[in-house]
Image: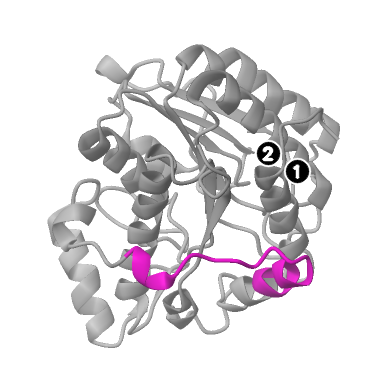
């Protein structure tokens, strides 16, 4: 594989800034501060926005009910409003959310096709709370669930692992694969906390029983305890699954100073988490990792957290720092 193929791909589309949430924590300013932080470090080299495209509603309906997808399209076209108490839809929101799905699928294709070793997708709106029948928690379409479905149904992968380190439980992702043994879902999240799901005993049903693993952690969890729990989950759950691809719901609201979440982590911890995950990926799936932005609402520190993650994706696998 040549040097360019070994690079980390960074994905971004300006339409993500047009998802207008007004005075809301999940604001376009999040991506602006991330871009500034990456630019300062010489890391801002996104792929051309036109590469991904916008998938058809039928593609999004591989995870979500077709009636819901069309309802969001109509709602946005009419000017939008409040989908629920937490979730805002603006005129551009359907196209931004659909393009986020397209970006995730494009990143999966690049990594599985050998064009890149791994990828980071700076998308919004986020996705892991979006359930098959409806959005919630700032999320419209479940970007990571659709990326996993694409890898399995269109690319032909047999085992995909999703690691969710957002401070909130990814209830929508869990619902999407509750009975599906081909997708391993591992979530570390604050408990008790929004959205009230993610109990340790929740493990899936039917053929998918044992493919869902929740690691609930109290809000007082210290950074060294979190990192130990994360490494243990990788060693005891993800590695034995032998995934062919690892997807990451990369929420940075586990940062200690996050105004919404907070679980004691500092920016450098996201580099350590990434190195641990990359080591498992190297051992199991040729290093194939695709990371998608979820939460993270500290405008002062979000850029530093994302930069630590991206730097660790781009670096060689090395001992934890």
Label at residue 271:
1
Residue 166 located left or right of residue 212: right
Q: Is residue 119 magenta?
A: no
Give the class, few, some or many, for how many residues have Cα within 10 Å of label 2's Cα (few <14, many ≥20): many
Whether residue 39 is in magenta: the answer is yes
Percent from the top left, x then y, of residue 295?
58, 57
Q: Nearer the viewer, residue 143 or 274?
A: 274
Residue 255, x across and y down, in percent = 75, 52
Name the residue at the bottom extreme: 79
Q: Residue at x 21, y 36 (%)?
A: 153
User: Is residue 172 at least partly visible in the picture?
Assistant: no
Residue 316 placement (x, y as % from top left):
71, 36
Instruction: Name the residue nearer the viewer: 171 or 53.
Output: 53
Query: Which residue carries the number 2 mark?
Result: 274
- How far apart marks 1 and 2 lie (CA) works out to 5 Å
Q: Is residue 309 visible?
A: yes
Q: Residues within 10 Å of mark 1 (few under 14, many from 20)?
A: many
Dot 2: element = helix
The numbered mark at residue 178 is none
Task: Tell me: residue 205, above or below residue 12.
Answer: above
- Magenta region: 34-52
Name the residue nearer the viewer: 244 or 224. Answer: 244
Asked whether, in this view, residue 309 is left or right of residue 236, the answer is right
Query: Which residue is located at x 29 percent, y 87 percent?
Result: 79
Which quarter of the figure has residue 159?
A: top left
């Amino acid at each position: 594989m040549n040097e360019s193929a070994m690079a980390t791909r960074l994905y971004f589309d300006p339409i993500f800034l047009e998802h207008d949430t007004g005075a809301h924590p999940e604001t376009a300013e999040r991506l602006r501060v991330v871009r500034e932080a990456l630019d300062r470090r010489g890391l801002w080299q996104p792929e051309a926005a036109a590469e991904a495209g916008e998938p058809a509603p039928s593609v999004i309906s591989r995870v979500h009910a077709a009636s819901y997808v069309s309802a969001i399209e109509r709602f946005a076209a009419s000017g939008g409003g409040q989908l629920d108490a937490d979730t805002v839809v603006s005129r551009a929101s359907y196209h931004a959310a659909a393009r986020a799905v397209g970006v995730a699928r494009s990143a999966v294709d690049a990594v599985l096709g050998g064009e890149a070793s791994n990828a980071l997708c700076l998308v919004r709106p986020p996705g892991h709370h979006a359930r098959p029948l409806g959005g919630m928690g700032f999320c419209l379409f479940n970007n990571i669930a659709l990326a996993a479905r694409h890898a399995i149904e269109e690319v032909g992968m047999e085992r995909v692992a999703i690691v969710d380190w957002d401070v909130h439980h990814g209830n929508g992702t869990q619902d999407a694969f509750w009975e599906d043994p081909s997708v391993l879902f591992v979530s570390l999240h604050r408990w008790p906390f929004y959205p009230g799901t993610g109990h340790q005993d929740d493990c899936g049903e039917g053929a998918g029983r044992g493919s869902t693993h929740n690691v609930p952690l109290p809000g007082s969890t210290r950074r060294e305890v979190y990192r130990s729990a994360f490494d243990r989950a990788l060693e005891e759950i993800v590695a034995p699954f032998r995934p062919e691809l690892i997807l990451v719901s990369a929420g940075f609201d586990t940062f200690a100073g996050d105004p919404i979440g907070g679980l004691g982590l500092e920016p450098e911890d996201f580099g350590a988490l990434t190195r641990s995950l990359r080591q498992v990926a190297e051992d199991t799936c040729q290093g194939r990792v695709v990371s998608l932005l979820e939460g993270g609402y500290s405008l002062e520190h979000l850029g530093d957290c994302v930069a630590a993650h991206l730097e660790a994706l781009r670096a060689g696998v090395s001992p934890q720092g």
